[in-house]
Amino acid sequence: MKANTSRWQAAAPAAAWLTLVLLALSAQQVLAGPTDGAAPPSNRAAEAAQAMPRPALWRVRLNGGGSAWLFGTLPYARPGETTLPAYVQRALAGSEGLASEVRMPPDKLAAARLIVGMRQEGASFKGGLDPERSRRYQVLCSERRLPCEQLDAMPAFFTLGALSKLLAVQQGLNPETGSLHAVHQALKDKPFLELEGMEASMSLLRELPATDQLALLDRLLERQGADGVASYEAWLRGDVAGMQQQLSETAFSPATHERLLTQRHRQWRDKLVGLLREGRRLFIAVGAGHLGGSDGLDALLKAEGFEIERVDG
């Protein structure tokens, strides 16, 4: 298939979120695993590792025409686990192009430049916390050997996102083997439509209100990486409702939910609808949290008249 240059974008250098995190700090001690005081993986996690993965995949069609596919990805997986079962691989093989938020793997030089541009000289994340939150935050950083000092001059949204993901890595999730990377590798030679780009994502997150930043911090202090594991287990089971429950518990305000999720989904829908109506066999891979619910990307495509059918075998 020849790329339609009016709609298909060349894959501009961009950085994936977790890659930005790992480039921003020397993470070897973090990736090595939790300290003696860290919570070990749960029995539930071990059971999930033994189950056949059934991540959610949807067929997207218009009036019974050719199929496109909608798949929710995660940036990490447990070592040795299959993140693309046979039914997903068949969908990939039949696709003529990939649509995703950001092209993977990212350009490391572009990522480094973006990191440098985000640093706020003289700013301090922990210095802006009230005494009780500051105390709990420093205990977490010390007990879990997190590189909080290296992240202290970064914007709050980046620091919190970085620590959340690094805590998930300590729980045994590998940032190099997730379904996000596997999908991009499988379709690396096909035309690519970038739905957003990392710089646009960062711009949105920079505007996160202080109240929502504190809600994220409180959640991080309470859960200490368990959210990442719970989301992964739900993803393995194809439990879209469970993924949505994890998202709802982040305690974002309605206005922030609208800005970070609903508005972005509408923009992605607008980029996709024309191509899908032309019968393009796209494999649409977005973060799993962007699917499900009344304002998920799948719901918005259904409202445009597309048939959205769940496939799991």
Image (tube, rainbow, N blue to C red):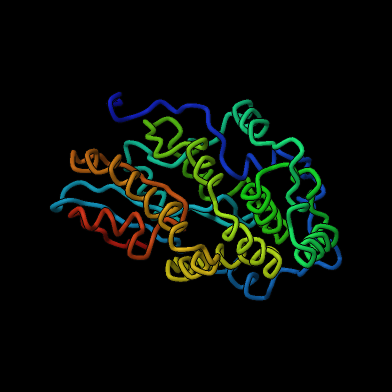
Relative to 196, say whether 289 is above or below.
below
Relative to 103, say whether 235 is above or below.
below
Query: Where on the picture, by quarter, is residue 48?
Result: bottom right
Q: Residue furthest left?
A: 63
Q: Which residue is drawn at 78% across and 67% down?
A: 132
Quarter containing the N terminus: top left
Q: Position of residue 269 (x, y in %)?
A: 30, 46
Residue 52 visible in the displayed image? no
Relative to 17, say whether 222 is above or below.
below
Of 42 and 52, the residue lying toward us: 42
In the rendered structure, the answer to whether residue 175 lies left or right of residue 271 reads right
Of 197 and 49, the residue lying toward us: 197
Q: Which residue is drawn at 76% across and 50% down?
A: 31
Of 68 and 106, the residue lying toward us: 106
Residue 142 visible in the displayed image? yes
Relative to 267, say whether 164 is above or below.
below
In the rendered structure, the answer to whether residue 219 lies left or right of residue 313 reads right
Q: Residue at x 71, y 58 (%)?
A: 167
Q: Residue at x 57, y 59 (%)?
A: 212
Quarter containing the C terminus: bottom left
Q: Position of residue 235 (x, y in %)?
A: 50, 63
Q: Residue furthest bottom?
A: 43
Numbered label tally: 0
Query: Where on the picture, by quarter, is residue 80?
Result: bottom right
In the rendered structure, the answer to whether residue 73 lies left or right of residue 131 reads left
Q: Where is residue 110 in the image (x, y as percent from the top left)?
A: 59, 27
Q: Position of residue 231 (x, y in %)?
A: 55, 64
